[in-house]
Amino acid sequence: MSSGRLREIGVLGALLGAATLLIAAVRSDLGAHTQRVKEAHDVYALPPSAQLKVLSLGYDAAVADLLWAHTLVAQGIHLTERRRFENITRLYDAINELAPTWRAPYLLADALITLQTAAIGIEEVTATRRILERGVEHRPFDAELWLNLGHFVSFTAPNSYLEDHPELAQSWRQEGLRYLEQAAALGAEGRIGWQALGGAARLAREGKRDAAIRYYERQYAVTDDPELRETIERQLTRLLGERHRRRIVARRKAFDALRDQEFPWLADGDGTLLLLGPEPRVECAGSDEQTPRCATTWREWAERFYAEDDG
């Protein structure tokens, strides 16, 4: 090897050695500085939701799925680092814009948004309600979404996050009862029907007897769960007395008998009959007969049933 080549190798080695020493010297200070610096705020790098839908180039579901996975992972990281997840509601807006009927994000919205390492403000609470209401807007027949919305608005938010806003909390309690009543009407069977009973119980405790009775009667009319019916019957007896309870039970039995006789193709628990209305009868055409069998709506049928019973 020539002397010139040896000199080049020596110079290169010297430069590498010097660079290594410089990196080590700077790295020690930089490492100490990095240990002291903590991430305090999140950076939201996505465009507005409407623009994001355009930028997804038609792959709305795929982008929404990617953002949802990021939201779940980021939530865990924020909890581990004891930091607030500041962008979660904005991520939810983006996901809902891309996939407005996707059920899973709506079901977990109240838990994810309110699960923070520090107390949440009224902005997050209001945003949570807005997202849950968006869910029932896009999935109006999903009883579980109505139930989650009703529980959050009527119980969770007023009791846990709106203590400093008593008037707003009371307003939310009343509005949440309507959501629970809708959940009871849509999902009268199973756990949803049982959990929705809390709305009627609250009305009764607050002295709103007529509203509680209407709530129980509506749920009694749509459920085919015998145990749930029995529970509602006991509550109606307490609120109305035995005679009125018997009338409501008799009306339901008459309705079930009518369904089994004239609509045998409908299964128990099928709410289709409530949408169809009473079967038209030829003999009732142009007639002034005020019997239940000539009613054209179920409301009219119920009124005539009670009138006939009283007669």
Image (cartoon, helix red, strand yellow):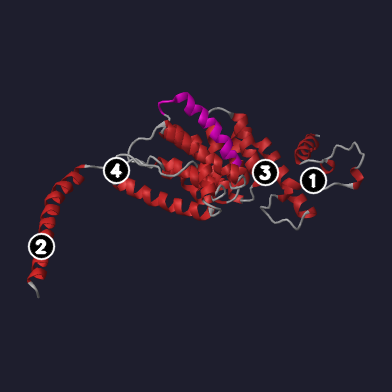
Could you say which disc has been placed on residue 82 in the image?
A: 4
Numbered disc in front, either 2 or 3: 2
Locate the C terminus by quadrant. top right
- Up-down relation of residue 122 to residue 99 (above or below): above
Q: Residue at x 13, y 56 (%)?
A: 19
Q: CA distance from mark 2 to mark 4?
A: 50 Å
The x and y percentages for residue 71 are: 41, 49
User: Residues at badges 2 and 3 in contact (C-beta under 8 Å)?
Assistant: no
Q: Give the residue at mark 1.
A: 278
Magenta-colored span: 163-183
Residue 165, labelled with which disc? none
Report whether residue 183 is seen: no
Q: Which residue is mark 3?
A: 221
For mark 2, does the 10 Å Cα neighbourhood hold few (<14), some (14 to 19), or many (20 or more) residues? few
Asked whether the residues under the numbered discs 1 and 2 touch, taking CB atoms below 8 Å apart as contact, a structural biologist would say no
State how far apart marks 2 and 3 are (Cα).
93 Å
Q: Which-is-in-front pick, marks 1 and 3?
A: 1
